[in-house]
Amino acid sequence: MQKEQINIVDELTQSDYKYGFVTDIEHDLAPKGLNEDTIRFISAKKHEPEFMLEWRLKAFRFWQQMKEPKWANVKFPPIDYQDAYYYAAPKQAANKPKSLDEIDPEIRRTFEKLGIPLTEQQRLAGIAVDAVMDSVSVATTFKEKLSELGIIFCSMSEAIREHPDLVKKYIGSVVPYTDNYFAALNSAVFSDGSFCYIPKGVRCPLELSTYFRINASETGQFERTLIIADEGSYVSYLEGCTAPIRDENQLHAAVVELIAHKNAEIKYSTVQNWYPGDKEGKGGIYNFVTKRGICEGDNSKISWTQVETGSAITWKYPSCILKGDNSIGEFYSVALTNNYQQADTGTKMIHLGKNTKSRIVSKGISAGKSQNSYRGLVNISKKADNSRNYSQCDSLLLGDKCGAHTFPYIEVKNKTATVEHEATTSKISEDILFYCNQRGISTEDAIGLIVNGFSREVLNQLPMEFAVEAQRLLAVSLEGSVG
Amino acid sequence: MSLLKIQNLKVNINGKEILKGLNLEVNPGEIHAIMGPNGSGKSTLAGVLAGKEDYEVVEGTIEFEGKNIFEMSPEDRAREGLFLAFQYPIEIPGVSNASFMKTAVNEIRKYRNLEPLDAMDFLKIMREKAKLVEMDQAFLNRSVNDGFSGGEKKRNEIFQLAMLEPKLAILDETDSGLDIDALKIVSYGVNKVRNKDNAFIVITHYQRLLNYIIPDFVHVLFDGKLVVSGGKELAFDLEEKGYDWIKKQYNGVLV
């Protein structure tokens, strides 16, 4: 498909967070707080098999012994883990709807507002949608079409019930619950997420996507996603998030695990615009996510592409373990922070196999009084002969009250490795803005043009429909940052 | 109504007087050359007209098509039809010439209540204008002025001029840093674009450019004022006699 030249979108939407609305439907809530009973409650509500409950409990007990990590370049007030609901399901969870007509009309209206019409038109657009409302999946579309190919794409909850062997085999294999504090928490209380399995040799014909929405006040969102690409298969997965305006900070501690077998490829794209907090830095989502993929088989490939503009605090490192020989890991990222947002994000590329390659392109844009940090690890292990890494971290600063920081870690234990690292820092100077003004371009549009150009290499990695949304997002997120 | 009318313009920079009562009137179809020694205020004049912020306008008026220019932002002045070819064109890495021009063209069209150009129409016009100024099509996809030689940057200014079709174009020392071939190309472009409805103010230090862009009026800027005006022969006089002649004639004398 020929990509047209990406041009800046002409119309700018208003600065009010346009996805800020709440659905007024009843919720089935677990009592506030977090203890073993909460875990049992969640597992029972979901009718999970025994192994899952056991796993959750092990994770919970492990979590209780851990301490919250403090090494990131972000500041936040202490989180009271007891002061939240860990399960909230829309009322109709009991009977899964068989057709779209059975869905609660309020919920359907919510999805339409979010731009997810669960209709035949959507099918023609070629996107299968697994819509997650708070803690329970409401509908899974196009299951039949995909199942013809043997592709499993459903909610995590459903996968645990319908495909327990697959889940048991892979869950925690890339991110064990011992990995870190938030992964342990997630493993204990994860509510739902996406599960995807692509069988041998199958190229998934649709972009798979998922929408999330945090709804009930003080309900942390702990989604868990697992994608398995069997030998020779291909899948492209899109993750896009929106959330309503809330005063209380909301914790989003997701875990995403990707497994690519021999000759398989997984492309995982994210456009994230969770509520970032208001202009004074009040409220906003905490996005503490563990995302990791393993190139298990030879010649496999995993690429992460993310456009992060939301959340009060973003703390995530989508990473690749390059275990198979000749495997490839890629990370493309645009992280934008404005007002009082903070981001500490980057990637880890762990080279284990021979002839493995990794590519990191990170674009950080800081505005307002925000702090934006890139943290990356390139680790070449002893046996990883002929590995190559290329890293590029560029920072763009708008104004003089924001910060851009870079923490690159390079650990090389093999003499045949090639590791390249480039970094630039730039400002949008007065001269550039005046030049644009003198050509009839307003300062806001000029910044949009420049940011778009700056992010181009990353935006080009996104599937077309996401690329347009991403550009718009960048422009909207920078409104009011001028001056 | 004149296109541009400057009356008694006095401009300071950081409290220092630069322009001390400048008067100028430009009508459609005219080319005015402004020459003067270094430090005479030529770039200040260009900057004030374009709306650059570093200048303190102490006194005087500037009317563009009868409208008070000081009430217009730089982008509005551009949209009204004022163009400045920069002496030192700015580099904008990551933004292609094509998308830069498309944004500018459509902004100006929007201001004038015209429909924006779609990609196909725009591409066609862009290719035409590139050809006009003898600019290689390959430049269109390159980032604005990024890695361009001095001559290429100046030619890019004229390309943009051709694309935006301004009513008044100010060329701020466009010839500085150009060899004779580049000079000819730039002049050729300007001559192709000039017509009876638009006007040019050519600010230059040397007479040489004026062999190719033949002015209707030549003014000499000295000590913050236009001290002498004449036809194109004045430029030859200056070339022959040098600015010392002006300094001797007009030092301290009000005209």
Image: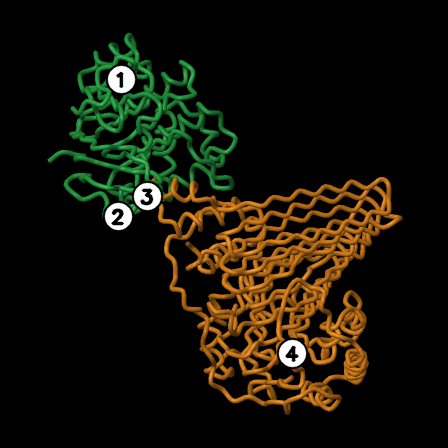
Chain colours: A orange, B green
For the residues labelled 3 and 2, say whether their Cβ atoms are less than 8 Å apart: yes
Do marks 3 and 2 both belong to one polypeptide chain? no
Whether residue B106 sits left or right of residue A200 in the image: it is: left
Q: Chain of mark 4?
A: A
Residue behind mark 4: A79
Do marks 3 and 4 both belong to one polypeptide chain? yes
Three-letter residue code for mark 1: Lys
Do marks 4 and 1 both belong to one polypeptide chain? no
Give residue B173's position: percent from left, percent from top. 35, 25
Disc ID at residue A440:
3
Q: Chain of mark 2?
A: B
Camera-nearest label, 3 or 4: 4
For the residues labelled 3 and 4, say whether their Cβ atoms are less than 8 Å apart: no
Q: Quadrant of the C terminus of chain B?
A: top left
Give residue B226's position: percent from left, percent from top. 21, 25
Could you say whether the residue bearing mark 3 is in a helix, strand or loop?
loop
Residue behind mark 2: B111
Give residue B56's position: percent from left, percent from top. 30, 42
Q: Judge whether residue B119 can be spotted in this image.
A: no
For the residues labelled 2 and 1, say whether their Cβ atoms are less than 8 Å apart: no
Rendered residue at 29%/14% (across/down) = B244
